[in-house]
């Protein structure tokens, strides 16, 4: 099933949230300060969903990867206020990280980042339809399965920098979270880090921000890892005071200090990478995008002689260079 018809973004956003800064919305959703407000009540049933997408670096910019991270605040301490733990580990350990790879065009280059190097869970190969179904399900979670009249849980969508706006110009994948009626807020981890004064730079990179928290990123160009790192940066920025502030560190400088003095941030991240994580309940973990076989992966492929004649004849240098990455039947081009 495809996403429901769009409603306008502005009418879908509750006024109460629109008036607050993104950092305050996230702080109230995470509920670490113990103060109950009207925003806490509004977001009681909300689910946070981080999304990061990648596309082919050349036209037609077909989507290639979707990183998704979901966090259900109600699962932590029954939704009641809680201390986030060192480097927010008691919240981060409840985040589910997923990495979808679109089968169509998987043989073509999607820019920097290794699509095989997802470190926070299992990558699955999916069709466009499966990816859209998955996103639709995430955005339409009943508040109460037994009482459909209560409607769906509000979604707080988190992205980073221009990744969300890029999706608007790349219409091949028709999914715009800002236009779905269940979306209660659109947040940007780059904005949250700036509002929390982690940096004075207006457009800091994810890599730079992770370094501020003493976290060494691994393959952050992979969309699955990117979604994980975006979630971490947003949480640590919004919870800066709760996680780092002390008498010795009154400015809450990130690092191994204050309530987070027991361990380095990297230990928390390493644990998140090493723990067993359930795979998404669809798609396949094995798929060869050279010959479309579902029993082996690209590096195990025995069909070394495939050359796509359409790409071999192309005027584009990059297409000629990738003519041997796929059999002709998998080519995304008409000629
Ligand atoms: Zn193969
Ligand atoms: Zn081709």
Image (tube, helix red, strand yellow):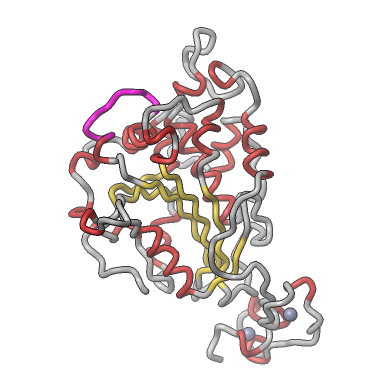
Viewport quadrant of the C terminus: bottom right
Horizontal and vertical percent for residue 148? 25, 59
Q: Residue at x 65, y 78 (%)?
A: 317
Q: Is residue 314 above or below residue 139?
A: below
* Range of residues picked out in magenta: 32-40
Asked if the stretch drawn in magenta spans residue 35, the answer is yes
Horizontal and vertical percent for residue 19? 21, 38
Horizontal and vertical percent for residue 226? 55, 50
Image quarter for ligand 1 equals: bottom right
Q: Nearer the viewer, residue 50 or 71?
A: 71
Q: Residue at x 52, y 56 (%)?
A: 67
Viewport quadrant of the N terminus: bottom left
Q: Residue at x 30, y 47 (%)?
A: 185
Magenta stretch, main secondary structure, is loop
Q: Is residue 3 above or below residue 245?
A: below
Q: Nearer the viewer, residue 173 or 5?
A: 5
- Total numbered badges shown on the rendered structure: 0
Quadrant for residue 38, please give it.
Answer: top left
Horizontal and vertical percent for residue 204? 50, 40
| Residue 72 can be seen in this image | yes
Q: Residue at x 61, y 85 (%)?
A: 330
- Left or right placement of residue 144 versus residue 195 in this view: left
Asked if the stretch drawn in magenta spans residue 88, the answer is no
């Amino acid at each position: 099933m495809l996403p429901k018809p769009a409603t306008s973004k502005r009418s879908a956003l509750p006024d109460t949230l629109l008036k607050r800064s993104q950092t305050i919305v996230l702080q109230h959703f995470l509920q670490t300060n113990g103060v109950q407000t009207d925003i806490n009540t509004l977001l009681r049933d909300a689910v946070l969903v981080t999304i990061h997408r990648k596309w082919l670096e050349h036209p037609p910019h077909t989507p290639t990867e979707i990183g998704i991270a979901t966090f259900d605040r109600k699962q932590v301490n029954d939704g009641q206020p809680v201390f986030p733990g060192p480097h927010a580990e008691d919240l981060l350990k409840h985040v589910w990280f997923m990495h979808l790879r679109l089968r169509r065009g998987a043989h073509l280059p999607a820019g920097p980042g290794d699509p095989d190097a997802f470190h926070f869970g299992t990558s699955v190969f999916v069709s466009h339809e499966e990816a859209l179904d998955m996103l639709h399900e995430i955005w339409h979670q009943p508040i109460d399965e037994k009482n459909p009249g209560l409607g769906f849980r509000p979604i707080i969508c988190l992205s980073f920098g221009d990744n969300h706006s890029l999706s608007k110009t790349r219409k091949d994948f028709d999914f715009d979270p800002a236009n779905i009626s269940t979306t209660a807020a659109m947040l940007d981890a780059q904005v949250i880090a700036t509002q929390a004064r982690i940096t004075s730079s207006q457009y800091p990179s994810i890599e730079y921000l992770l370094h501020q928290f003493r976290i060494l990123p691994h393959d952050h160009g992979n969309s699955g890892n990117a979604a994980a790192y975006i979630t971490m940066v947003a949480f640590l920025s919004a919870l800066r005071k709760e996680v780092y502030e002390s008498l010795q560190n009154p400015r809450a400088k990130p690092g191994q200090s204050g309530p987070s003095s027991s361990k380095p941030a990297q230990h928390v991240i390493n644990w998140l990478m090493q723990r067993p994580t359930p795979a998404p309940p669809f798609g396949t973990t094995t798929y060869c995008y050279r010959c479309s076989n579902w029993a082996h992966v690209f590096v195990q492929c025995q069909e070394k002689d495939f050359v796509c004649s359409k790409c071999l004849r192309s005027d584009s240098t990059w297409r000629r260079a990738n003519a041997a990455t796929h059999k002709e039947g998998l080519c995304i081009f008409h000629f």
